[in-house]
Image (spheres, helix red, strand yellow):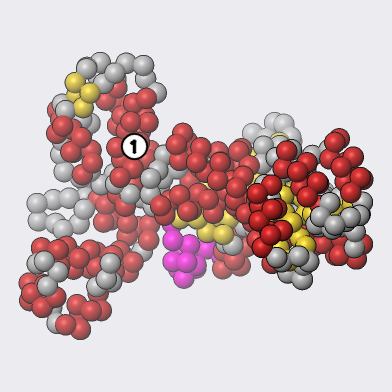
Amino acid sequence: MVVDDDTLIAQSLSFKLKAFGNVTICNKTGEALDILSNQSFDLAFIDLNIDNELDGLEILKKTVAKNIYSIILSSYDDEENIQKAYEMGCQDYFVKGDEDRAIEKVVSSFLLGEKKFILDNFIQNTYITNDQHTKNEILHLVENISSDIPILILGPTGTGKSFLTKKVFEACHKNCPFIELNCAAIPENLLESELFGHEKGSFTGANNKKIGLLKKANGGVIFLDEIGSLSLGLQAKILKAIEEKSFTPVGATEVVKSNFRIISATCENLIELVNQKKFRLDLYYRLTGVNIYLKPLSERRDDIELLIKHFLKQTPRKIIFHKDVKTILNNYNWPGNIRELEKVIQVLKSKNKGILLPTDLPEQFQSKSPFESSDSLLTGYIKKHALTHGMNETMRKLKNELVESVMNDNDRKVNLSIKTLKISSNTFYTNYEKR
């Protein structure tokens, strides 16, 4: 709602606000109060002087009572009126002439206020985390899930990319279809039919006409997990479908239109795949816009105990872990991330024991990783990190962590650490990113 007796200002404000929603303009105090008696709004921009001096405060009183996010936009900039407006409950006060910045600030504050509730609910009940980076990434996803900007979810297998995206979409955008497909879980010869659909008799086994997932996603989102596994041929067809919002089902002659949006995810380094000519650069640019990265569980160790408590909460029977079990679980690198942790807790709950001992832990905790041997430095986690992020990034991280560890051992003494590592000063400063 925009309430201002200056028609030109009201229309200008309305024109700019239409990008965010429907706008109602009022030029009279009585008209505004009548409308507020029968309607509600998310935001209200109110001038202080409409029919009479400061009668905008009467409208403010009404909007605050109806829990409308209320903004004063006035030519008055004296402290007395500003204080009075804030005391009556307005959330923001702007002086006329600064409308563009006012709109940008107000709309983002309002949306963040709504989405903060969603975020708080998520980190307590759905995607459990105390890690600030992960909280920021979830908020970033929440902020952009309803926009038209492409979203690419990155992170190792098992970090919950698909789970998180679906839950956030359901919370923010409930009335639109959300279609999900794991591209790596379907054979290549069936994937095209799954995405685009097919006509009856178009191939052996096509006994009925099939509606493709891209058509089912009309007006909503299709979430393509493990998109890095697609063949170059399918990549070309998906790119064309994204650009034209149309495609031809297998065996069909007529084009099908669908106004879908793609959100994608992968555990692979798409840039590396592009460099290896295994992923199309033009498709990569179509998929990237907002990139969300979910860290592996080994990089947010404070979440391990939180997640264990969350998974244990799902059973009415009380279970206690021996202190050695807690130590082992907290120190384990969790190459399978949240998915692996949840599976381990399921196994432990099935033991039908009140107190769980180290001997009750699954096989991966009783023996070395299949990637490890007595004379090898390669651990399962290092290999997993390299396969996800590339060898160069893994070596950079490994060198930095080694230098950091030796620095801690040597009470942060640089020269002693250089001597301990048997490296030059130049090598030290090249490989050490100070924390």
Give, as a three-letter code, the residue at label 1.
Leu
Q: Residue at x 77, y 54 (%)?
A: 45
Residue 157, image x and y in percent? Answer: 40, 47
Above or below 6: residue 175: above
State left or right for residue 274 relative to residue 71.
left
Q: Residue at x 37, y 31 (%)?
A: 310
Quadrant for residue 394, please give it.
Answer: bottom left
Q: Residue at x 91, y 45 (%)?
A: 30
State the residue in front, 413 or 220: 413
Above or below 42: residue 241: below
Q: Which residues are magenta?
A: 264-280
332 in magenta: no
Above or below 74: residue 199: above
State the residue in front, 57 or 243: 57
State the residue in front, 249 or 183: 183
Q: Residue at x 69, y 53 (%)?
A: 84
State left or right for residue 382 relative to residue 167.
left
Q: Secondary structure at mark 1?
A: helix
275 in magenta: yes
Packing grade of label 1 (10 A; few <14, some 14-19, many >=20) is some
Residue 229, image x and y in percent? Answer: 49, 53
Q: Can you see residue 429?
A: yes
* Residue pointed to by mark 1: 306
Residue 267, image x and y in percent? Answer: 43, 53
State the residue in front, 152 or 145: 145
